[in-house]
Image (cartoon, rainbow, N blue to C red):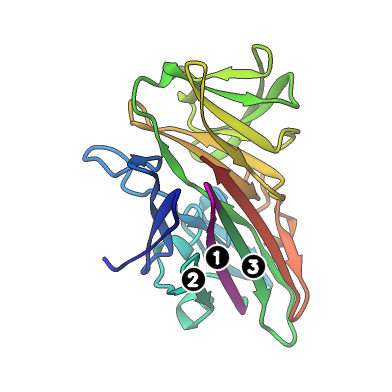
């Protein structure tokens, strides 16, 4: 695996130049990103594109053709072009090709930029429709896993603008039911039981800057930027928590399977582009 590393006096990051995946985020000697362990999730921060979540039946219809896509799309498993720019940025590019068009019939250019400044990592995505004639329909999302060095019940998340959380939950990777989680003075106390039905999916979240605490000590502040949706997930007994800004989400059990009817997508006209960003302050 080829890796690209940048650092300043406060933080450093490492990016896998093959998959454009963040593999390390350190401040001084403390590692904040989950490091792969046997028996647990074997990803760390995959890029979710051109869908977020799963499709009903693993496929969709567009222009009377049927296409298959795995959960979260293909970008996380493809080879990107990555380079270091000005010692403070890593820029990665993924372009549509014959392989992607078999699964997703759109021409695109996806650019991912990691920038470090003082103790903050900025992660920015630009999706461009490179077609002269056709519109583009897509979702985009992030899936970073942050290390929890201790029992999950030692940790909590603070949502300063929310009194409770309206949560969509999954059944076999499809949106299946809703529930309300009451917060304790804006605090969500984490536990294994919270994730018995997989991820917590928040489509109406008000809070942008989400704080992770261990006991009462702030670990970091995570800002979901202009992503409208947010996911929280952990694997059972695993030493991480995923904080996931999304534009898009899984199908429901009642989804039609027609791409133009899928909720949570955005559309780009020929040569139009759109930017998304999230950042984390250690």
Asked whether residue 54 appears in the rendered view, the answer is no
| Residue at the far bottom in the pictured view | 132
* Label 1 – label 3 distance at C-alpha: 9 Å
Label 1 vs 2, first from the N-terminus: 2
Q: Are marks 1 and 3 in contact (CB under 8 Å)?
A: yes
Helix, strand or loop status at disc 2: strand
Q: Residues within 10 Å of mark 3 (few under 14, many from 20)?
A: some
Check disc 3 and report the residue beneath it. 126
Helix, strand or loop status at disc 3: strand
Q: Quadrant of residue 260?
A: bottom right
Q: Nearer the viewer, residue 1 or 128?
A: 1
Q: Residue at x 61, y 63 (%)?
A: 125
Q: Nearer the viewer, residue 137 or 13?
A: 13
- 46 above or below 102? above
Q: Which mark is residue 92?
A: 2
Indicate left or right for 26 with 250 as reference: left
Check disc 1 and report the residue beneath it. 113
Q: Magenta residues, as a range?
A: 107-121
Label 1 vs 3, first from the N-terminus: 1
Of discs 1 and 3, which sits in the foreground?
1
């Amino acid at each position: 695996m080829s890796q690209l590393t940048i650092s300043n006096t406060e933080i450093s990051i490492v990016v896998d130049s093959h998959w454009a995946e963040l593999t390390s985020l350190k401040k001084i000697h403390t590692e904040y990103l989950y490091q792969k362990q046997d028996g647990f999730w074997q990803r760390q921060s995959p890029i979710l594109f051109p869908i977020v979540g799963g499709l009903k039946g693993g496929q969709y219809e567009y222009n009377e053709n049927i296409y298959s896509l795995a959960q979260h799309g293909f970008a996380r498993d493809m080879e990107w072009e990555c380079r270091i720019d000005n010692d403070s940025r890593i820029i990665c590019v993924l372009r549509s090709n014959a392989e992607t068009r078999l699964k997703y019939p759109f021409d695109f250019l996806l650019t991912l930029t990691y920038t470090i400044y003082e103790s903050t990592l900025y992660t920015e995505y630009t999706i461009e429709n490179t077609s002269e004639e056709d519109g583009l329909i897509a979702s985009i999302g992030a899936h970073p896993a942050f290390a929890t060095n201790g029992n999950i019940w030692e940790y909590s998340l603070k949502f300063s603008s929310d009194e409770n959380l309206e949560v969509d939950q999954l059944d076999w990777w499809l949106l299946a039911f809703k529930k309300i989680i009451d917060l304790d003075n804006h605090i969500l106390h984490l536990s294994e039981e919270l994730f018995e039905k997989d991820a917590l999916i928040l489509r109406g979240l008000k809070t942008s800057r989400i704080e992770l605490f261990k006991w009462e000590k702030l670990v970091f502040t995570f800002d979901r930027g202009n992503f409208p949706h947010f996911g929280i997930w952990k694997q059972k007994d695993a030493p991480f928590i995923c904080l996931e800004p999304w534009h898009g989400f899984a199908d429901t059990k009642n989804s039609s399977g027609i791409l133009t009817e899928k909720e949570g997508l955005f559309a780009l006209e020929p040569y139009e582009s759109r930017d998304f960003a999230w950042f984390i302050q250690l």
